[in-house]
Image: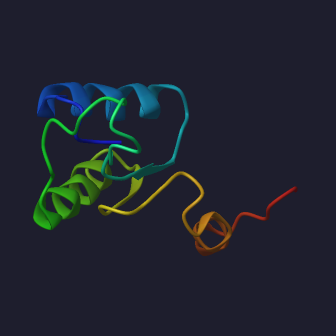
């Protein structure tokens, strides 16, 4: 999730770490403060910022699905099927 004060360099480092670990699909969304006593949002990432993340992943041969409301379970089955994987296989 983005919006907790991370830098672009830190995000790139995480993407690089994912590639090094053999990950090929990452979902990235916007952190939203769930309750007043939780961490506040440091910044709202604009839609074009999320679109740029998909390109940054593509340059690493990493599939990135990024948008403000994307979560780790966001259309997971469809994403895997699009890659040719089967859940539970």
Residue 67 in the image: state x and y as whole percent: 31, 63
Q: Is residue 65 left or right of residue 42?
A: right
Which residue is located at x 33 percent, y 48 percent? 32
Nearer to us in this view, 65 or 57: 65
Residue 55 figure quarter: bottom left
Residue at the far front in the pictured view? 36
Nearer to us in this view, 57 or 36: 36
Q: Is residue 18 left or right of residue 15?
A: right
Q: Is residue 72 left or right of residue 50?
A: right
- Quadrant including the N terminus: top left
Which residue is located at x 67 percent, y 72 percent? 81
- Quadrant including the C terminus: bottom right
Residue at the far right in the pictured view? 89
Residue 50 in the image: state x and y as whole percent: 22, 58
Looking at the image, residue 26 lies above or below residue 15: below
Residue 21 in the image: state x and y as whole percent: 53, 26
Which residue is located at x 34 percent, y 28 percent? 14
Looking at the image, residue 57 lies above or below residue 70: above
Residue 69 in the image: state x and y as whole percent: 37, 63
């Amino acid at each position: 999730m983005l919006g907790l004060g991370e830098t672009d360099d830190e995000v790139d480092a995480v993407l690089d770490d994912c590639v090094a670990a053999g990950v090929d699909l990452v979902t990235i969304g916007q952190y939203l403060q769930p309750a007043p006593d939780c961490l506040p949002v440091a910044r709202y990432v604009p839609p074009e910022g999320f679109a740029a993340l998909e390109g940054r992943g593509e340059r690493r041969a990493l599939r990135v699905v990024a948008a403000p409301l994307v979560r780790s379970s966001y259309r997971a089955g469809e994403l895997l099927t699009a890659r040719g994987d089967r859940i539970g296989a």
